[in-house]
Image: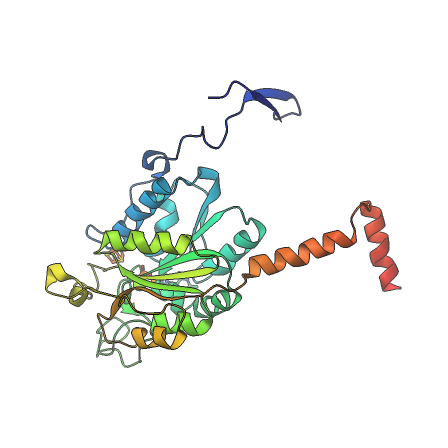
Amino acid sequence: MSTSTTEIPARGGNITAVPSITAEERKPLTKKEIVADHPTWCPGCGDFSVLALYFKLIEKRKMWHEKITTVAGIGCSSRFPYFVQAHGAHYIHGRALPFASGISISRPDLHVFVFGGDGDAFSIGGNHFNHTARKNIKMTYVVMDNWVYGLTKKQTSPTSPLGFKSKTDTWGAVDYPINPMKQAISAGASFVARTTHTNPAHVMQMMEAAMDHDGFRFVECLSECVEFYEGAFDASNPRKGGVFNLVPADHDVTNEMAAYKLADEPFPGYFGIFYKVNKPTKNAKEAGINTGAMEKVKGLKDWQILQKTFDRMK
Ligand SMILES: Cc1ncc(C[n+]2csc(CCOP(=O)(O)OP(=O)(O)O)c2C)c(N)n1
Ligand code: SF4
Ligand SMILES: [Mg+2]
């Protein structure tokens, strides 16, 4: 540790000298420091895997405690922030994205992660999903898709397949399910990937690739609800006799039509990055507007800025 000191004001206005350390000297955050309450999910729930990989990601990428924020809506999957000992919010059902957007735009130094379920993302939050994607707001959004409403004990979700018997469709679901990948691409997300909780190395790979992309990153992660939709994803799990097909190596991730084609494959489909393009984020655009506005009032006192505003109103 460096022996140099830095002056920071203590509570009450006094000045206290505390030792300062450089970024290189600072110890990376460990899993032990970031694990919160014991997760209350059912034993065997796919969400455990996603949480464990989030901790691993934080450790591996040496993210600092005060630079991470974990946001969610409502649902079993959305309990996620409770289990992370860091800043974050368990917000309103379907409204995690607008809340996270505010954080992302006002604090560009933070890693903003949003976790949630298929109901939260595509039913009540469907509107916000489309708009956050089209605005290309910088954040990582992992939808833990279990094809059902788990928390409310088995209702049909927008991703439930036709014929799925639930408490809201006792004779079997009659509504056509949405395709999250197609929806994300068409809404304007600049990073769209698909993974499954049964392949932890792949989940990690997708989360890392997402983090490294500048824009709205959407990751659909199949996450089995063992209580209300057991075996939903067996066809994608080689340990259950299914197949796990990676996105073909020659797929052009910048080709939107090719991405739709991949997304159109019947289940189990493909896993990997379907779409990834670079385009300016809302964060960058707004920062540009702010810089321009600040430039115009450079050197002026607050009252002079106010006076200028009043003058314009005359
Ligand atoms: C405004 C509002 N409407 C409905 C509910 C009830 N509700 C809570 S969670 C949920 C669905 C959650 O499903 P999903 O997002 O798929 O999460 P999962 O539990 O499957 O992980 C619903 C309908 C609520 N809490 N608030
Ligand atoms: S009800 Fe389903 S989604 Fe919810 S914790 Fe249990 S297994 Fe997981
Ligand atoms: Mg769900």
Vertical comparison of 158 with 151: above or below? below
Task: Please report the residue visible at 71 percent of the width from the left and 56 percent of the height from the top.
Answer: 292
For residue 271, which quarter of the picture? bottom left
Along the line of sight, the residue nearer the viewer: 270 or 71:
270
Residue lying at 67% horizontally and 25% vertically, measured from the top left: 13
Q: Report the side of 56 relative to 276 (left or right).
A: left
- Say whether residue 60 is visible: yes
Instruction: Report the label total.
Output: 0
**Residue 74 image point, x, y percent:** 39, 57
Percent position (x, y) of residue 94? 44, 63
Residue 299 in the image, given as x and y percentages of width and height: 80, 45
Ligand 2 shows up in which quadrant of the image?
bottom left
Instruction: Determine whether, in the image, residue 234 is placed left or right of residue 23.
Output: left
**Would you identify the image quadrant in which residue 45 lies?**
bottom left
Residue at 64%, 25% (x, y): give it: 12
Q: Residue furthest left?
A: 241
* Nearer to the camera, 171 or 175: 175
Colour option used? rainbow
Could one spot residue 41 in this view of the protein? no
Seen in the picture, residue 91 relative to 122 is either above or below; the reply is above
Q: Is residue 182 above or below residue 106?
A: below
Q: Residue furthest front?
A: 250
Task: Give how far across and how far down residue 232 sits, in percent.
Answer: 19, 66
The answer to whether 80 appears left or right of 64 in the picture is left
Q: Quadrant of the C terminus?
A: bottom right
